[in-house]
Image: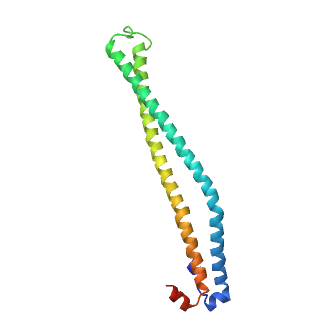
Amino acid sequence: DPRVAARKPTRLEKLTGANTERVVLYHVARSTLDTEIEPARIRAVAARTAIRQMDASVSVIEDEICQLDQSIDAAKAYLRAHPNAGRSEVGALHDSPRERLERRITNLGVLRLSHVQVKAQMALAKGNAVDLLDRFAESVDVLVPLWRQNAIGIANGRDLDPEQIASAT
């Protein structure tokens, strides 16, 4: 808090060096903020790239869901149109082609559900990433400059006498 660093120290604080520590901690925080913003901007660019990749992946998943729907519908239609096709003889030791096709239809249905879940999870991840990017942009573009302005104002106000401050406000 720049106000804490700018306030006049008490005698005890002068004696123990607490006022100097306060000012140093403020300056360290400010310089740390300056050095951490640039790597964070680079990460924000990477997050925007990841969001674009998520959009592309969701598009591919949607296409695959449509293909799975068509395959499942076509296989079910074939089984309805040909009720005796691929049936094995009574007492056969192996699965009939019809039973294998029915299992395949079931597996495709499970794969389709998995794709739907992945699509929902990607939408959730994208929403979180967009929210974090909005918060980052707000912090860097609005709050940090405001904090800096406030700190400069308080630091400059510390050197003014009370009459000048009263006349400015």
- Say above or below: 97 vs 165: above
Q: How many marks?
A: 0
Residue 1 appears in view:
no
- Say above or below: 36 vs 58: below
Residue 98 appears in view:
yes
Which quadrant is the N terminus positioned in? bottom right
Name the spot of residue 77 as percent of width and height, x first: 34, 18
Name the spot of residue 132 as percent of width and height, x first: 51, 55
Q: In the image, what residue occupies the spot 59% across and 49% down? A: 46
Name the spot of residue 106 as percent of width and height, x first: 40, 25
Left-right relation of 116 to 161: left
Left-right relation of 119 to 17: left
- Say above or below: 86 vs 11: above
Q: In the image, what residue occupies the spot 50% across and 56% down? A: 134
Give the image's coloring scheme: rainbow
Quadrant of the rendered structure where residue 151 is? Answer: bottom right
> In the image as oriented, which residue stretches furthest toward the front?
167
Q: In the image, what residue occupies the spot 66% across and 63% down? A: 35
- Say above or below: 117 vs 68: below
- The residue closer to the viewer here, 165 or 84, is 165
- The residue closer to the viewer here, 97 or 11, is 11
- The residue closer to the viewer here, 105 or 142, is 142
Q: In the image, what residue occupies the spot 48% across and 43% down? A: 122
> In the image as oriented, which residue stretches furthest toward the top?
89
Name the spot of residue 72 as percent of width and height, x first: 39, 23
